[in-house]
Each structure stands twice: as C-alpha cells, then as structure tokens.
Image (spheres, helix red, strand yellow):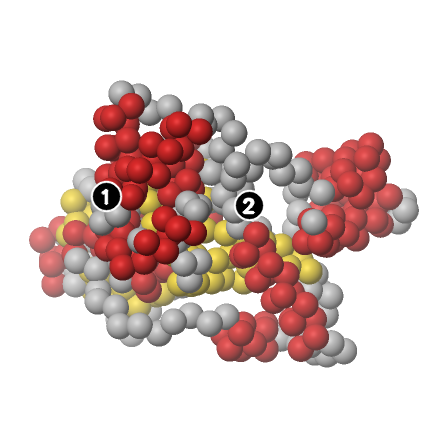
Amino acid sequence: MENEDFLAQKKLKIIEPFLNKEKKLKEIEEESNVSYATLKRWVKAYKESGLEGLNKKERADKNNYKKLEPKELEKIKKLYGKNKNLSISKLYEQYSTITGKMNISYPTFYRIINNLDSFVKNSSKPYIKTIEVPEYSYGIFQYPVYFPFNLQKIYYITLFFEISTLRIVNYSFDKEQKTFKKLYLFLRESILKEGVFPKEIFLTNTILEVSKKSLRECFFETSISFLIDDDFDYSELRRFSHFLELDLSHQFYGNKNITENDIFQFLNAYIYIEQKETRDLEFYYQRKLDFFLTKSIRKVNRSRIRLKNYIYFSDVLKDFENEILEIKHSPYNETAIIVYENKDFICEAFRTDEI
C-alpha cells in the first residue's frame, strides 16, 4: 500500500492547483504532460473519495487464480512437473490438448507457471535456462517520475525487460508519456540491443493507447505476439522506479542549473544494464523490425535520395532512377536509411557529405 499511497499523493500534488482554484486543468495539462481526460478523472475521483479515490484498485483475486478450479491448477502443476524442459507455450498447447479447451488465457497460464510453489520451482532450477531460451519473453513498463528540480516536473521512465528475471535490457527517460505507437522506435532499439528476436512482449497497463488493431498489425508485420495483461505484477519495477525517483531528487537537490545531459549521465550509472556478448540479428529478423521505423516516400535522383537535410547514396539505386520508393528511417540515427519497393527490401543507403 505504501507505493500506492505515494502514487496517490503524487497525483494529488499535480491537481492541487486546480482544487485550490489557482490554475485551470488546461494549464496543468501543459505543465505536467498528463492528459486533460486523465486530470478530469483524478479530480472526480478525489472529490468523490478523497486520497483513496486516487489509489489504483487492485483486483482482490490478483494472483490467486480464483476462477481456476483447484483440480485444474493441480493438472497444470503435474504437467509442468513432468515436462520441465518444455517452453511455456508448448506446455500451454499440451494443457489445451489434455483439457480439450483453452479455458484460461495464455498470459494467465504464463503467470501460473511463474508463481508455482517453491517445491516445484526449486525442483525445476536445472531446467530454467532451457525454459527461458525458447520463450524469448520480454515486457515494457512505463512509470511517471516526479522531478522537482527542472521546469519539466514530470518525466516518464520506460523499461524494456526480460519477463522471467526482470533484467532491464534498455530504458528511456522522456518528457512526455509515450503511447504504444510512439514506443515503436524504442522497441526496435531494445530488441537490436538484446540481440534476440522476441517471441512475445507483455505490455503492462501503464502503456497508453494500445488497440487491438495495432496489436494485430504488429503481429502480422513482425510475428511478435504483444500481450496485454492487466494483472501483470509489476510491483518490483514500480518499486525500482520509486527508488530512482527518490535518488534523482537527492542527487540534484538544490541544483537549479541541471541539464538533461546531467540527468542521463546519472541514469546511465544508476540503471544497471548487463553488458553481455550479443550477436547481430539475422537479416530476416532485422527486416521484420523495419516495421517499427518511421516511413516516408521519396524519389530517386542520380542514385541518391534526399531526406530532410541529408543526401543518401547507394549504387543499387541506379536501377530505380526517378522512381518513388518507400523509405524507412530512425530520427535518432541519420547515418543510413532503408529503401523498399512494394514491401520488398532494396538496399540500405548511406548518408553522404553532400547538401
């Protein structure tokens, strides 16, 4: 409850100027980057139920599997005990075959396997690696960080992490809360950094504007399953973010001239990201990830393509003179662009010194 109370206090601090008739919600929206609709919801909740109304209510049956009959839970335990070397997805297939129906969702099944009693978990330790490697399961978590020593008082920490160990693979620290689609470039960067192509990515309920349409599109284009699970237990990640918030405030207390560079130097030292040997993803999987890049349409001229203030060149483009092609690129990496024609990869074109 302590973390929930802290989050409620933070929400109250944001809407307090409105409650005190000092500011309008539109002004607070601009200052805090919290949407107008969310602010209205917080005000309504506070007026109706006080601070308790700002607490996020957790389901009473969270992680208790009350909808699952005890005999069904026992079936899952026995299945896992006999097949500890199988991936969770394979276990789920077997369970569905045995029961003749999928009476529980895959995310729930995944959570049950990862919350088995200590006896089953301890007996499975030698097999943990063989279970994790085929799964390639990751998650994305986003959390507001109140940072009073800068004009921009609310930042958002986004973590890309391995599901089974909560190991942080990558992070971003932004002035605005990013919607699912605005996290595409971060997703691509994180997957390339890990050097492993995920089978599935869990989205915590802190990620905004996740539609079924966008999830289907992602799966169709990348073959990665994006799973929404409102019951995902991200208390450890939230606790980590809370401590980060406190340590940031302690580190920069009284410093009115703080720069973003100062913040990122601190974060790079604070957030431990394991340095491990990774191999580049196979060409096929790299092309799958091109879906997450920004798309533009450009015309080829003298084997060159102009994008923004740069010229990109490739010998391959001489066969496409004067044609209009699709360009995929990252605004954070302007050294190269990726060129497509009718969804077929053509080449990478590299930036020249020409203007």
Residue nearest the viewer, comparing 220 with 93: 93
User: Amino acid type of disc 1?
Assistant: Asn
Residue 210, which numbered label?
none
According to the picture, the residue beneath numbered tag 1 turns out to be 83
According to the picture, the residue beneath numbered tag 2 turns out to be 206
**Residue 264 sits above or below residue 292 on the image:** below
User: Amino acid type of disc 2?
Assistant: Thr
The image quarter containing residue 222 is top left
Label 2's element?
Answer: loop
Q: Position of residue 294 (x, y in %)?
A: 36, 50
- Residue 288 in sight here: no
In the displayed structure, does residue 311 sit left or right of residue 19? left
Residue in view at x 42 percent, y 70 percent: 273
The image quarter containing residue 37 is top right
Residue in view at x 19 percent, y 40 percent: 342
**Residue 38 sits above or below residue 333 on the image:** above
Residue in view at x 37 percent, y 59 percent: 190
The image quarter containing residue 281 is bottom left
> In the image, which is nearer the foreground, mark 2 or mark 1?
1
Q: Position of residue 217 (x, y in %)?
A: 33, 35
In the displayed structure, does residue 236 sit left or right of residue 34? left
In the displayed structure, does residue 130 sit left or right of residue 40? left
